[in-house]
Image (tube, grey):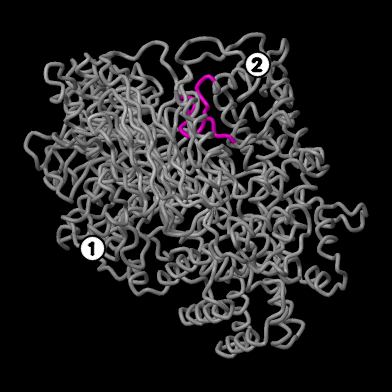
């Protein structure tokens, strides 16, 4: 029995597409109608957990008093008149390859809520766990190859409030998490790489053994629905374990050493490279996570060590994607919790700041070499072209070929509109 | 007006029943009086059986031909929809083959120039067209700036949105049809919501007239709908037939109005039937399902049954207890033949997993299967529940308590995140002790509701820390102990029930004087929080601003001089509360049988009928008359034949799972699954900060750094919804069982089951047999033995091959499911 809820849509339908539902078009039909169109864009999201200071990176205030300006001097970028700080030399050099939003208003100053809000586009709500982008992509577009549609590299996401998870869409759409460090020599992926002592031949044998025993249980073709669902997941899992693209995707050691070095031989750099490999193998959404950005103390010395890997990897990732002809179909985003206080505190740090911050995007038609929006003289408030996390979300949805008026249903059946924002016009 | 019609109707029925008037069809209603310019009525033509209308009567509305004797006065279309045109009287001729009849229609009030009323005429149209749905203009920010209240619960918001907002840009008083309010839904101007209204339709014309009359605002005391009546209420049909519904609304001033065209219709099982915008049901599958009919905050159901067969084979069926009596009458009604009873090996596995969340050990399986005692199933159930009275046999009581503590801790949301470590332990120990001593579930609930004092000393008091304000308490309490989801009514009228904001805030008033404060003590338990009752504190109705008197749902006002929670607790966990016993029964039915009588399991309401209402009522009575003894409830369910049916569906009953025609398989949840893997492989898992040997079902808290539990969805206990423990499998789980180190390490463990069997130098046959019993709780068949020996033969090493057999057994559905 299916169940009807607040506006008479059953949970089985689960998702309808706002305006389209008026035309009697439900999701399967919509997908069918769309089947002939080109494959949707993919996305690599780089998440710097903790809140990367905007003052000290992409939105410097060289004319502000020292107490706000901070220790770093500014440098010219590839865009005339635009300056970044000295800890972003590589980003500055390649500023013509991406777009920066300086008019982001995070409207939130606490961790946890940030991971949830920024990566879903919906403010935290006790009653509704809003799904993160990758889960929605996974839900909406499904598998492309044997690889899971949504992969998260690293564990630097604060999940106390459901950040970075599938929420109401259900466990099935959670990211496939890889906690191992791709820059390590011993890099293996949990549950994909067979456990010690198990060869691929043995996996094949086990697979056959399971199939044979299972076949004996099926005295008739009739089986309960739950069994069929399990079969589906087992098949996907076995495919993934044994598919050549899986082995290939994770074989980061097969990359040329020179390229590996140009991404930076550190966790973030190699994660970005891995993200590119995953996209190539059919993953639709990769979140690369990086931690340690909550610089309440020693903001400047902290950034001096935190920034270089990011500064190296992001432009390199964009250029690598471009060279491979993947940039037009891959959206690259760099997002973080929020901005940090204009005023430097007594511990030479900056605290949480809920009104300004930055966001970076490239690829998938985002106009490269543009700076959108501005903050006031002290970087405390948005003075021009303000956009919120809702709008960033709408942009991501639009770029990834998902309707921005998508409705999903909470487990209790209420129809939930996943987004309330509007796409960033200048980037569309 | 309608009252008279109904009298005439009964009179007509008597006439029809006389043999002289040998009519074959009944017209409903037998005479029509239409009042007002846009008045309509739906005729329903029903074939008579032995001169009577009964649920099996065929609907002939679509087959008949209708003509009006005077189209100036009244028109009628092919579907039997009658429309007023001008004041006067006319006849409608109805013919079907040789049969014919005519009914008189009297029309009045068409010439009346009274302005169109917002509540009576306009709002139902906004609801019917879907404008005020939560996903459309009633979303938080409306759509395109146009905001309506959800399902029209607040006409002031609607009026403001339509007429006043944005400098009245949505309305054109000079040229009403040029109003954006009409151009959008008719798609004359692009509309994100698509076409919702047709130009020239009655709904459209009504809105035009309202605008022409100057768009009068809603009146302060509208004539509200008090009830709606659906005809027919019940229908037994075959597949591929239609049934036209007719809906009459009764207003506060006792007038009746045909609202068939203005209701919203929802098929509650789209696989079985569909329903059109104008209330025409079409059956397309077998089974039993309802159509929900909604109008102006009222909701009713028409139940439709399409039997699976005429004469089900029920010869083998024997009733074990009263549950089966109700099951079989449902099987007869629906023509279902249930699956046969399951064998002993299946039963012992099922009973252990369902009652105590544990896989039986090989010894336990063999002891049961080999016992020759016709009453052995009953005895096993008593033993698992600790009801034998013999301490030597009642050895499972601790595990019973652990397993059900786990279930209730999920629901009550016990976790360190919510309560800190001391609070979590206090609550855990209290819940566990309650199940250990088999406390009546009424007492359990009362202790929670009236809990006071230290969070560290008094376990149930933590309920007030987890739910720290009156709204959270209202919602959690209603959902947990009544199975009612009241949260809709916080902001608007419940869409499928008659609950209003007054009901919600009336319930909230019980909790308006309870709070927590910091303890003033020092020392070990100092600075903890304490639940206290304050002398003041009120719950206000958000629209009227009035203080609410504490009032139970659909019940009495209950003030109390000391603690408002006392009368609430006394009512909540008692027979006075019509939902309490049912909500408990439904949860336990779903835990044991894989499906509640009502689904979702905590969503009891009149528009969500049980698959077997009589069984539901009988079980609730049973719980009430057994002093809310939950063990007795579990016992009676497990002793029923429906519980003991095979899980293999048959061609005939495969889609009748919701009537318990076979045992519905369910995936073993994260914690018992980990325990089961440990039992099967004869290994253990060590959990942080807990003594070795602690089972996963005994874990008090939510967060353990255990990859298996995390992947298999141990709930984080953030929601009271039963749905938090998602039953859906996912890729990571499949990957982990197939390829993960948890299972692999346990299979390879030298001191594990396989290791010991190998060390004991058993033969392949013996080992394979032992592995089967340890995992699937039965010996292999001949065929299975051959296959497994083949698997061993293929491996390079015997040990590896046997490991692969064990691996395959654990990964098979026979293992992962309670079946």
Work out whether B6 lies above or below A286.
Answer: above
Specify the farthest residue to the left. A80
Q: Dot 1 lies on which element?
A: helix
Is-magenta flag for residue B494? yes
**Looking at the rendering, which quadrant does residue A346 occupy?**
top left
**Looking at the rendering, which quadrant does residue B416 occupy?**
top right
Q: Which chain carries label 1?
A: A
**Which quarter of the figure is the N terminus of chain B placed in?**
top left
Residue drawn at the location 48% of the way across and 37% of the way down: B230
B496 sits left or right of B816 in the view: left
The magenta-colored residue range is: B484-502
Specify the farthest residue to the front. B20
Sort mark 1 into few (<14), some (14-19) or many (20+) by Cα contacts within 10 Å.
Answer: few
- Marks 2 and 1 belong to one chain: no
Q: Where is residue A383 in the image (x, y as percent from the top left)?
A: 18, 23
Q: Which of B451 and A282 is in front in this view?
A: B451
**Which quarter of the figure is the C terminus of chain B placed in?**
bottom right
- Asked whether residue A167 is in view, the answer is no
Mark on residue A259?
Answer: 1
Q: Report the Cα–Cα distance between label 2 and label 1.
A: 75 Å
Q: Where is residue A172 in the image (x, y as percent from the top left)?
A: 45, 55
Is-magenta flag for residue B185? no
A105 sits left or right of B763 in the view: left
Residue drawn at the location 19% of the way across and 28% of the way down: B182
Q: Dot 2 lies on which element?
A: loop
Q: Which chain carries label 2?
A: B
Q: Which of B580 and B270 is in front in this view?
A: B270
- In this figure, which residue is indicated by the disc labeled 2? B557
């Amino acid at each position: 029995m299916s169940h009807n809820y607040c506006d008479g849509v059953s949970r089985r339908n689960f998702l309808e597409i706002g305006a389209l539902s008026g035309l009697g078009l439900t999701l399967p039909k919509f997908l069918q109608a769309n089947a002939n169109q080109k494959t949707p864009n993919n996305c690599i999201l780089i998440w710097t957990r903790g809140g990367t200071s905007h003052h000290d990176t992409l939105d410097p205030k060289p004319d502000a008093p020292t107490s706000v300006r901070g220790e770093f001097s500014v440098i010219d970028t590839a865009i005339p008149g635009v300056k970044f700080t000295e800890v972003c030399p590589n980003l500055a050099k390649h500023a013509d390859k991406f777009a920066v939003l300086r008019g982001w208003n995070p409207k939130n100053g606490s961790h946890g809520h940030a991971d949830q809000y920024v990566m879903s586009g919906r403010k935290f709500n006790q009653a509704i766990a809003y799904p993160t982008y990758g889960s929605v992509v996974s839900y909406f577009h499904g598998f492309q190859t044997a690889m899971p549609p949504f992969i998260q590299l690293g564990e630097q996401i604060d999940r106390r409030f459901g950040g970075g998870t599938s929420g109401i869409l259900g466990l099935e759409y959670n990211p496939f998490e890889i906690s191992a460090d791709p820059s390590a020599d011993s890099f293996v992926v949990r549950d994909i790489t067979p456990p010690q002592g198990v060869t691929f031949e043995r996996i094949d044998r086990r697979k056959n053994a399971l199939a044979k025993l299972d076949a004996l249980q099926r005295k008739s073709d009739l089986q309960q629905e739950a069994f069929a669902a399990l079969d589906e997941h087992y098949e996907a899992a076995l495919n993934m374990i044994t598919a050549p693209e899986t082995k290939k995707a994770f074989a980061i050691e097969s990359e040329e050493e020179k390229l590996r070095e140009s991404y930076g031989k550190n966790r973030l750099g190699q994660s970005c490279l891995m993200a590119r490999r995953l996209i190539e193998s059919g993953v639709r959404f990769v979140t690369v996570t990086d931690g340690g950005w909550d610089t309440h103390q020693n903001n400047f010395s902290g950034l001096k060590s935190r920034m270089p890997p990011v500064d190296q990897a992001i432009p390199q990732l964009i250029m690598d994607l471009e060279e491979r002809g993947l940039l037009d179909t891959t959206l690259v985003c760099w997002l973080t919790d929020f901005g940090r206080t204009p005023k430097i505190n007594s511990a030479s740090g900056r605290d949480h700041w809920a009104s300004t911050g930055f966001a970076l995007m490239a690829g998938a038609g985002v106009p490269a070499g543009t700076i959108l929006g501005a903050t006031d003289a002290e970087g405390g408030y948005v003075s021009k072209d303000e956009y919120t996390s809702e709008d960033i979300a709408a942009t991501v949805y639009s770029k990834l070929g998902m309707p921005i008026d998508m409705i999903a249903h909470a487990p209790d059946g209420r129809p939930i509109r996943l987004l309330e924002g509007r796409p960033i016009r200048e980037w569309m | 007006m309608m009252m008279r019609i109904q009298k005439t109707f009964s009179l007509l029925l008597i006439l029809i029943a006389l043999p002289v008037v040998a009519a074959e069809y009944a017209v409903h209603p037998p005479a029509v009086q239409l009042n007002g310019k846009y008045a309509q009525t739906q005729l329903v033509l029903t074939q008579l059986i032995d001169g009577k209308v009964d649920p099996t009567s065929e609907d002939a509305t679509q087959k008949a031909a209708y003509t009006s004797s005077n189209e100036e006065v009244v028109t009628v279309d092919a579907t039997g929809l009658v429309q007023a045109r001008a004041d006067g009287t006319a006849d409608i001729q109805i013919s079907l083959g040789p049969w014919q009849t005519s009914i008189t229609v009297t029309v009045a009030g068409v010439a009346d120039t009274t302005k169109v009323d917002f509540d009576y005429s306009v709002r139902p149209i906004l609801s019917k067209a879907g404008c005020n749905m939560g996903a459309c203009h009633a979303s938080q920010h409306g759509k395109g700036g146009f905001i309506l209240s959800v399902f029209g619960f607040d006409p002031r918001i609607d009026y403001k949105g339509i007429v006043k907002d944005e400098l009245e840009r949505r309305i054109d008083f000079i040229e009403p049809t040029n109003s954006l309010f009409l151009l959008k839904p008719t798609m004359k101007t692009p509309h994100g919501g698509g076409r919702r209204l047709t130009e020239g339709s009655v709904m459209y014309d009504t809105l035009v007239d309202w605008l022409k009359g100057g768009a009068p605002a809603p009146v302060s005391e509208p004539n509200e709908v008090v009830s709606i009546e659906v005809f027919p209420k019940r229908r037994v049909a075959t597949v591929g037939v239609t049934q036209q519904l007719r809906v009459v609304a009764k207003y506060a001033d006792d007038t009746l109005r045909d609202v068939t065209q203005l209701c919203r219709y929802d098929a509650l099982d789209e696989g079985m039937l569909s329903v059109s915008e104008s209330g025409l049901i079409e059956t397309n599958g077998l089974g039993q399902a309802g159509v929900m009919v909604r109008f102006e905050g009222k909701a009713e159901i028409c139940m439709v049954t399409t039997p699976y067969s005429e004469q089900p084979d029920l010869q083998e069926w024997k009733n074990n207890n009263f549950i089966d009596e109700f099951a079989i009458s449902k099987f007869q009604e629906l023509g279902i033949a249930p699956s046969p009873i399951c064998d002993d090996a299946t039963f012992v596995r099922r009973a252990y997993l369902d009652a105590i969340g544990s896989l039986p050990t090989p010894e336990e399986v063999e002891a049961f299967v080999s016992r020759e005692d016709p009453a052995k199933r009953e005895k096993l159930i008593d033993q698992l529940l600790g009801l034998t009275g013999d301490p030597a046999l009642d050895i499972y009581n601790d595990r019973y308590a652990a397993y059900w503590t786990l279930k209730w801790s999920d629901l009550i949301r016990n976790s360190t995140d919510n309560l800190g470590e001391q609070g979590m332990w206090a609550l855990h120990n209290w819940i566990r002790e309650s199940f250990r001593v088999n406390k009546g579930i009424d007492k359990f609930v009362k202790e929670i509701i009236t809990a006071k004092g230290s969070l560290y000393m008094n376990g149930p008091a933590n309920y007030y820390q987890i739910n720290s304000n009156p709204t959270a308490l209202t919602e959690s309490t209603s959902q947990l102990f009544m199975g009612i989801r009241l949260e809709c009514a916080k902001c608007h009228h419940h869409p499928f029930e008659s609950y209003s904001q007054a009901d919600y805030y009336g319930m909230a008033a019980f909790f308006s004087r309870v709070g927590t404060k910091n303890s003033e003590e020092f020392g070990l338990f100092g600075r903890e929080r304490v639940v206290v009752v304050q002398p003041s504190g009120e719950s206000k109705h958000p629209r009227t601003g009035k203080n609410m008197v504490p009032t139970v749902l659909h019940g009495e006002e209950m003030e109390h001089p000391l603690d408002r929670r006392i009368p609430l607790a006394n009512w909540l966990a008692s027979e006075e509360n019509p939902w309490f016993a049912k909500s408990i029964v439904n949860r336990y039915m779903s835990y044991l049988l894989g499906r509640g009588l009502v689904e979702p399991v905590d969503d009891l309401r009149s528009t969500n009928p049980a698959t077997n209402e009589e069984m539901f009522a009988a079980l609730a009575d049973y719980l009430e008359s057994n002093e809310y003894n939950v063990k007795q409830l579990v016992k009676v369910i497990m002793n029923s034949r429906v519980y003991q049916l095979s899980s293999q569906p048959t061609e005939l009953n495969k889609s009748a799972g919701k009537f318990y025609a076979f045992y519905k398989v369910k995936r073993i949840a994260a914690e018992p699954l980990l325990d089961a893997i440990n039992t099967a492989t004869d290994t253990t898992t060590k959990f942080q900060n807990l003594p070795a040997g602690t089972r996963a079902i005994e874990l008090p808290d939510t967060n353990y750094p255990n990859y298996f539990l995390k992947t298999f969805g141990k709930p984080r206990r953030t929601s009271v919804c039963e749905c938090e423990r998602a039953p859906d499998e996912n890729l990571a789980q499949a990957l982990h069982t197939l390829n993960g180190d948890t299972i692999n390490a346990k299979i390879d463990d030298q001191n594990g089951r396989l290791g010991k069997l190998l060390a004991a130098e058993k033969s392949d046959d013996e080992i394979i047999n032992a592995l089967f019993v340890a995992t699937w709780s039965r010996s292999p068949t001949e065929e299975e033995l051959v296959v497994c020996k083949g698997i061993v033969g293929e491996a390079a090493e015997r040990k590896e091959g046997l490991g692969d057999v064990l691996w395959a057994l654990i990964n098979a559905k026979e293992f992962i499911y309670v079946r």
